[in-house]
Amino acid sequence: MTATNVLHTSDLAQRLVEAEATIEALLSGQIDAVVDSKSQTPVLLSKAQQALRESEERYRQIVEATTDGIIKIDAGARIVFVNRRFAEMLGYEPPELIGRSVFDLMSAAAQLSARDVFDQHGQGKVDAVDTTLHHKDGSDIWVNIAGSPLFDGAGRHVGNLGVVRNVTERQKLQSQLMVSDRMASVGTLAAGVAHEINNPLAAVMANLEFMADSLATMGPHPNATWLLGELKEPLEEAREAAQMVRLIVRDLKIFSRSPADEPTGAVDVKEIMESSVRMAWNEIRHRAQLVKHYGVVPAVKANEARLGQVFLNLLVNAAQALPEGRAEYHEIRVSTRLDGERVVIEVGDTGAGIRPEIIGRIFDAFFTTKAVGEGTGLGLAICHRIVTDMGGELTVESEPGKGATFRVALPVADEPESTVAVPVEASLAIGRRGRILVVDDEELVLRGVQRMLVKEHSVVAVTTAAGALALCAAGDKFDVILCDLMMPDMTGMDFHAELSRVAPHLADRVIFMTGGAFTARAQKFLSETPKEHIEKPFHAANLRAIIQRYLR
Amino acid sequence: MGLRLRLYVAGNAPNSVRAIANAKAICDEHFAAAHDLEIVDMLEQPGRALADGIIVTPTLLKLMPLPVQRVIGNLSDKDQVLLALTGT
């Protein structure tokens, strides 16, 4: 054995020191090139490193710039990577989530289904699920997770990759759509029912008024005093009852119109509030005394159907904040006042109030303090949206133990109210006698109106628009033409158009009678025509007052 | 007896440029009187690198005085470089 084959220990030590120094320099990035052991040629390290860095940067940019959250977990469901978007979705910084079990972020139910999904992932299946994850603040957010399994080189399942999208907004919208869909169908039904009720109701009211008037003007008939005494009260009660039916039907109509059919206009908040109070009365009366403070306020710019929905919701919520059966101890306060350019409507209760920690969330969709099945958590969210859409504000103020007050602030309307309200107590003074044409396909209505007017005017009644047109075309003279808007053979609108052709001087004399169910065309027509219309059922006094205006 | 050094670099790669600057600075500061610093680009003269048993750059070889010493890296740790050069 020759000495040249022996490596001296000092040389060995030297080589080891050099090897360590090389490794250290490599690790600290101080090396530019290495000699490739096979080809014995130098290879620049920086190029390979640069390429790696660029590639890493490219992937990092993609992962961080995507609008979706990205999460990687290992086979034991521990989080090994999240991008910033994912962490932000749940209110965390990315490092806070690394190493935690992904199940920590899930409710018990979500965990169960997630375990199923992971099992399937193990078998190579890919899918997407909608589920909820816990936000750091304790709320739940809805997410859609598209998951795919990760395998190592040997084909072992080593974890999962999830692409996570926040669908909370989408879920909210879907629920709101469902609710408004349901309301729209209820609304359509209600509008139909309202129409069906209004026509016979118009006849009932007209005839009741006729009977009351007849009794009052019987003169010195021997039985007059007795009849009057016996019948006055029942007649009055029948009229009141009919009046209540009229209001209920009108309320139904308010809540049935869809926003598209009825754009915003000048609305009397007091009137809407009164309607809402009547609808909520059954909820209110067992729980509280209702205190009203209506200040004098101008009309607001709003959609009356939607505003009615808001008021009703606030009233029912106020009532439900109070226990049943202690009505004498509790109050629900309703008030209106003008505050600068805005009308402020308040609905307050004397219930337990709203806890400060949840008051910031009560307008959030799905947030509810009611038991499961009692509330969807959508009512206030929808109210908030409706009021905001009208350019207004819905706010709440509450002191625990002292109740809560919801405040709706709406912009004052820049146009005057669209329908001229004729006071119910209009003058009964009989004016000039006129010649009136009444057109309605409902004979009951026709006869009722005829009776209502026949003492003061000469009344011609026809059941078809064609018949009315024939009279006018033949040169018959009328001071006023009362015409039903919705008739099966020819509508009031078509009648008016045709009348303008055959007897233009009479076209100005038309007053439309409306029963409630409007087609889109009728709605548009009424909002555009300067022609007057009177809603069925009407009081005789109102009708007489309107007719007298045409006779002057 | 003068100091003979040979610094293997890889073109103008960042660590090589830094190593050249560091080596010159150390020589000027501590061995201004007598030193010989040869700079060899391994990319241009791979044969010489092989002959000297260089496997990475930058590598500084102290040829004289003996024993031969190697310092690997960009020579930014001045104390370590001085230790290798002076053997103390």
Image (spheres, grey):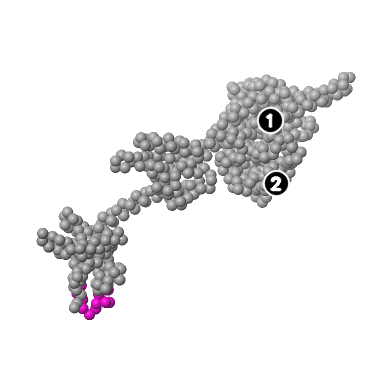
Residue A199: % across, % down? 67, 24
The quadrant in which the C terminus of chain B is found is: bottom left
Badge 1 element = helix
Q: Which is nearer the eye, A449 or A29? A: A29
Dot 1 falls on which chain?
Answer: A
Dot 1 crowding, Cα within 10 Å, few <14, some 14–19, many 20+: some
Which residue is depicted at the point 16% across and 64% down?
B52
The quadrant in which the N terminus of chain B is found is: bottom left
Q: Which mark is residue A248?
A: 1
Dot 2 falls on which chain?
Answer: A
Q: Which amino acid does the dot numbered 2 rest on?
A: Lys
Relative to A76, A230 lies left or right = right
Badge 2 element = loop
Residue A411: % across, % down? 63, 46
Query: Which residue is under mark 2?
Result: A402
Q: Is residue A499 visible?
A: no
Residue A210, compared with residue B72, is above or below; it is above
Q: Which is nearer the eye, A166 or A259? A: A166
Q: Which residues are magenta?
A: B21-37
Relative to B37, B80 lies left or right = right
Residue A230: % across, % down? 84, 22
